[in-house]
Image (cartoon, grey):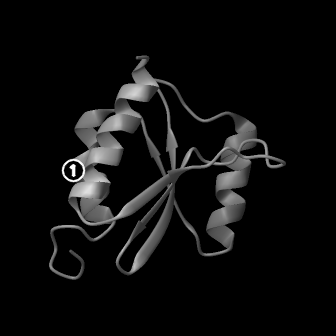
Amino acid sequence: MGPEAKIEAALIKAVIKAGGLTRKLNGTGYRHFPDRLVVLPGITAFIEVKARGKRPTSAQRHLHALLRLLDAHVYVLSNTDDIPDLMQQLGVGRGERK
């Protein structure tokens, strides 16, 4: 299992533990789309998973910016240690959401 796959597996586990749903986005017809859709009570977010130290490509950053202009929540995750912070940003553990 590669580094991105390990991060993605840990993200899936955290989302399920929080009572959420996550699906892999294959991007058919939409190159550079974020890797994962995460749905939790009260929030839906797109997650781009990158290996540690890697950054989204310029085309990915452009699409992320477009999604944000449309009021979408877009996050880049490149380290399993950042998952608790991400989950908190998504409202998990603050009482607003499960």
**Residue pushed farthest top?**
1
In the image, residue 12 above or below residue 65: above
Kind of residue at badge 1? Pro
**Residue pushed farthest right?**
29
Point out residue 26 in the picture as x, y percentages from the top left corner: 67, 44
Q: Who is closer to the viewer here, 93 or 58?
A: 93
User: In the drawing, does residue 34 fall left or right of residue 5?
Assistant: right
In the image, residue 78 above or below residue 39: above
Indicate the quadrant containing the C terminus: top left, top right, bottom left or bottom right: bottom left
Mark 1 burial class by Cα count in 10 Å: few <14, some 14-19, many 20+? some
Point out residue 56 in the picture as x, y percentages from the top left corner: 60, 36
Point out residue 40 in the picture as x, y percentages from the top left corner: 36, 70
In the image, residue 88 above or below residue 53: below
Q: Which residue is mark 1?
A: 84
Q: Residue at x 31, y 64 (%)?
A: 89
Q: Residue at x 41, y 20 (%)?
A: 3
Q: Residue at x 67, y 33 (%)?
A: 57
Q: Who is closer to the viewer here, 40 or 78?
A: 40
Q: Residue at x 23, y 67 (%)?
A: 92
Point out residue 9 in the picture as x, y percentages from the top left corner: 35, 36
Q: Who is closer to the viewer here, 3 or 62?
A: 3
Indicate the quadrant containing the N terminus: top left, top right, bottom left or bottom right: top left
Q: Secondary structure at mark 1?
A: helix
Q: What is the number of callouts on the image? A: 1
